[in-house]
Structures are given as structure tokens and as C-alpha cells.
Amino acid sequence: MNKENINSQRNSFKHLDTIAVLFVSILLISNIASCKLVKIWIFEFDGGTLLFPLSYIFGDILTEIYGFKRSRKVIWLGFFSAALMSGILALVGALKPAYGWSNQQAFISILGQTPRIVLASLIAYFSGEYSNSVVLAILKVKMNGKHLWIRTIGSTIVGEFVDTILFVFIAFSFNYPFETLKSISISNYIFKLGIEILFTPMTYAVVKYLKKVENYDHYDRDTVFKPV
């Protein structure tokens, strides 16, 4: 296949846009769901934790098939989408409510995130997803494309650790004792890793399908892993 045909193929992926949209949607929905704290068995965490780990699975799929550069572009898209959502919610919350609308305090209580929480969320998200993508891309080259489960779980171990630690300690330091922060971090981390492991068979199936349909499987052999 000549260079012109390769470039044409790369510009006509069938499912890249769909995966990118799902990735960003999961990110935004999980941010809103995080407004409620839930308890499942012995674990207590924000509601967004139920969905957010799926963003790492989609991140794995993006990097595994389409490569680090395309994954990085989608990560930045998610970052700016989350920042825009937070900004709009803050603006709407600050505006004077219309006459007869009596839910201002409820709106602020649920969606009026503090700047510190927003900052923690954005920093943790970008750092975690970037780390996840880099680790998976490097492992793919070193393993010559074999043992996908090691790459997806290994990259998530790193990415989710970075994400969890940064978010918890940026968002809640000095508000809670260290032991509480540690407990929250451990609960979130274990649950997120569990989701990744549980969905590994699905990840295998999706990756296999996409590689066949797209007829493309990228290796980041000469990639410079810059965040921008």
C-alpha cells in the first residue's frame, strides 16, 4: 500500500468519531453524577465513579488502535469540554433566577461545584488519561502487540492511581484528616481497577472488531510522548 493510500485510509476511519463522542460523553456524565455520594457494599464514593472508569477503557481502545496522537487529541477535547461545562454551570448558577423559580439553592447545592473541585477534576483527569495512554502505547511496542490484557490493566493501574491521588488530595486536603483521604483514595482506586478487570473481555472483543473493520493497528514506535 503506497503512502497516498495509507493517508487516505487514516482519514476515513469508520468509528473513531463515535468512540471520541462516547469518551467525552462518559466524562461529562460522570462529572455530573459525582455530585451524589453513594454506598455499594463496603465502598463509599461519588456516583461518577460508577461510570468514569469506562473512560479509561475507551482511552485504551483509542490508543491501542489509533495511536497516541489521536488519543491525545481526544483527551484534550474531553478536557476542554469538561472545562466548558463547569464554566457554564458556574455562570448559570451566578445569574439571578427568574421570577417564580424557587430552586436556586438546590441548583447551587448540586451543580455549583467549587473552583477547587473543578480544578482538581481537570488536573486529575488530564494527568491520569495522559499517563494511561503513554503507558499503553509504550507497552504495545515492547510487547509487539501481544498480551492486550497486560497493557490495558497495566496502563489503568498507573493512570487511575495518578487520577485518584491528584483529585482526592487537591480537592480535599486540609478539609479532612489524612486517614480519611487515604481511605477515600483506596476505595476509589480498588473499585476503578475492578471495573477495568471486569470489562477486559469486552475490551478484547471491541478491539478485535475495530482492528478488523478499520483495517488499522497503530504502533507508536517513533512517537514523542508530549502532552501537547
Image (spheres, rainbow, N blue to C red):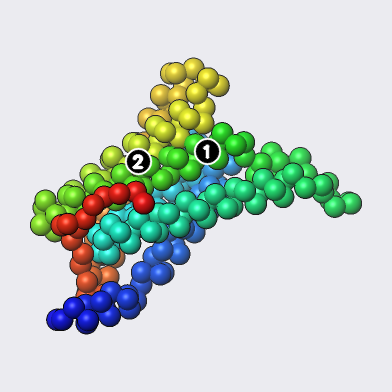
Label 2 secondary element: helix
Mark 1: amino acid = Leu
Q: Is residue 205 above or below residue 151?
A: below
Say whether residue 155 is left or right of residue 23: left
Look at discs 2 and 1 and give the one toward the viewer.
1
Q: Separation of disc 2 and disc 1 at Cα?
A: 17 Å
Q: In the rendered image, is residue 187 in sight? A: no
Residue designated by label 1? 119
Mark 2: amino acid = Glu
Say whether residue 118 is left or right of residue 70: right
Q: Position of residue 6 (x, y in %)?
A: 21, 77
Q: Quadrant of residue 5?
A: bottom left
- Specify few, some or many for label 1: CA neighbours under 10 Å numbering under 14, 14-19, or 20 or more: some
Residue designated by label 2? 160
Q: Earlier in the sequence, mark 2 or mark 1?
A: 1
Q: Position of residue 57 (x, y in %)?
A: 33, 54
Q: Residue at x 52, y 55 (%)?
A: 81
Q: Is residue 142 above or below residue 113?
A: below
Label 1 secondary element: helix
Give the quarter of the figure containing the N terminus. bottom left
Q: In the rendered image, is residue 66 in sight? A: yes
- Specify few, some or many for label 2: CA neighbours under 10 Å numbering under 14, 14-19, or 20 or more: many
Q: Which mark is residue 61?
A: none
Say whether residue 141 is left or right of residue 32: left
Q: Residue at x 27, y 54 (%)?
A: 200
Q: Nearer the viewer, residue 87 or 207?
A: 87
